[in-house]
Amino acid sequence: MVSEKAQEVMDTVRKEVAMANFQELLSQINKKCFEKCVTKPGTKLDSSEQTCLARCSDLYQESWNTVSNAYLRRAQRENVGL
């Protein structure tokens, strides 16, 4: 059995990893979508840039979720086999 203190540490580490993953997701969305959608940076975004950024962001998040879920399912299957 895992002690209560050890469980708290593992929970804290999991939360920190989740936060780091979320920050990486936001960083990648900003970088990739900005490069794709904003061809002439200015003082404000026009409507086509706003639409492009919204769609790009949605697709990137959807892809991230699909990959993450597939990874988790695979990891769970491999752990069950242990």
Image (tube, helix red, strand yellow):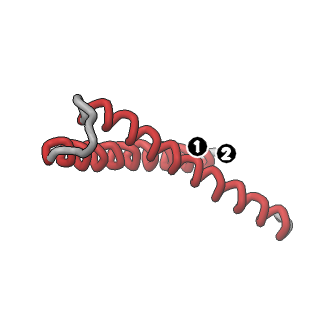
Q: Name the residue rendered at 77%, 64% in the picture.
A: 7
Image quadrant where residue 36 sits: top left
Residue 42 relative to residue 10: left or right: left
Is 69 situated above or below 34?
Answer: below
Q: Name the residue rendered at 31%, 46% in the picture.
A: 57
Q: Residue furthest bottom?
A: 4
Question: Which residue is nearer to you in this view: 12 or 34?
Answer: 34
Look at mark 2 in the image and give the residue it sits on: 82
> In x, y percent, where is residue 30?
39, 41
Crowdedness near tag 2: few (<14), some (14–19) or many (≥20) residues, C-alpha within 10 Å: few
Question: Which residue is nearer to you in this view: 11 or 36?
Answer: 36
Q: Name the residue rendered at 32%, 36% in the picture.
A: 34
Q: Are marks 2 and 1 in contact (CB under 8 Å)?
A: yes
The disc at residue 40 is none
Label 2 is placed on what type of residue? Answer: Leu
> In x, y percent, where is residue 38?
25, 34
Which secondary structure, mark 2? loop
Residue 24 relative to residue 37: left or right: right
Label 1 is placed on what type of residue? Answer: Glu
Residue 1 relative to residue 14: left or right: right
Is 63 situated above or below 11?
Answer: above
Is 68 situated above or below 9?
Answer: above
Q: Residue furthest left?
A: 48
> In x, y percent, where is residue 43?
27, 42
Q: Residue furthest front?
A: 43
Question: Which residue is nearer to you in this view: 9 or 19?
Answer: 19
> In x, y percent, where is residue 20?
59, 48
Q: Name the residue rendered at 44%, 46% in the picture.
A: 26
Look at mark 1 in the image and give the residue it sits on: 78
